[in-house]
Amino acid sequence: MEIKQKLLVAKIGGNIIEDENALNSFLQDFSKIEEPKILIHGGGKSATKLASRLGVKTEMIDGRRITSAENLDIVVMTYAGLLNKTIVSGLQKHNCNALGLTGTDANVISAAKRPVKFVDYGFVGDVTKVNAEVIKGFLELDIVPVFCAVTHDGNGQLFNTNADTIASEIASAMSDYYKVSLFYCFELQGVLENIADKDSVIEHIDLEKYNQLRDAEVIADGMLPKLQNCFDALQKKVSKVHIANADFIKDKTIKHTTLSL
């Protein structure tokens, strides 16, 4: 039986990205990981701030951004430009040879416009394909891919795509070649039982527990799609999924949330 090489897929969110010290600390720790690794980043808070400065309204429904044409321009400028290159340069600072990518670069992540059902999300794309072979090629050259949350449809249309979803889809696609661990990194220690108590970490969540927490509205807003992405990844053969504080990247013993089916 073939033993697959380990691969870490990590996703960082806006609260870490916007804190210069927290971001630099994370990138330094991430750079020290010797196994192949991929980084995905969001940046919604930065995009919202820029939209506000430009007088463009931001609308969210169930933790997901409604992306008008104006908002799409802001998202692409923020995610693919300033944030992506800031992160890549930060990794290079720590001798980690990184390459910043959108889904359209090398046709790595294709997407289709989200169908209008109850809500029209605008220029939001749902991932249809991840070109794992191309990503594998970068990894074999010891290049660390750094993905922002921008995809395309192959016909010239860019889309805003949820970064948690991109992390889940990339991790799932790469599981054909690697033993993949998926790490959702944010400022808290994990999923909390009580949002007012930062120590009330739920250390293990399976599908049954997830449904109970959702029905009881213990988890809501942006945490709902995040957890759904976790379970999607596990169902697609990702080995491990964790939600944790940034320090988990260097210390696996700290309190955190582990997901399982």
Image (spheres, helix red, strand yellow):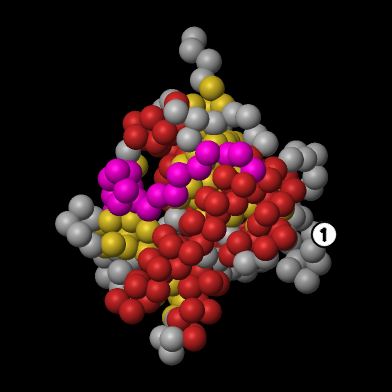
Question: Could one spot residue 226 in this view of the protein?
Answer: no
Image x and y of residue 245, in percent: 71, 53
Task: Work out whether 39 lies above or below 181.
Answer: below
The amino acid pointed to by label 1 is Asp
Image x and y of residue 134, in percent: 34, 34
Task: Work out whether 237 lies above or below 243.
Answer: above
Residue 15 within the segment the image draws in magenta: no
Would you call the spot at circle 1 few (<14 residues within 10 Å), some (14-19), or many (20 or more)?
some
Q: Residue at x 65, y 61 (%)?
A: 16
Residue range (magenta): 94-111
Q: Residue at x 45, y 55 (%)?
A: 148
Q: Residue at x 61, y 62 (%)?
A: 17
Q: Residue at x 34, y 31 (%)?
A: 133
Q: Which quarter of the image is occupied by the C terminus?
A: top right
Image x and y of residue 80, in percent: 42, 60
Farthest residue, direction top: 1
The residue identified by callout 1 is: 199
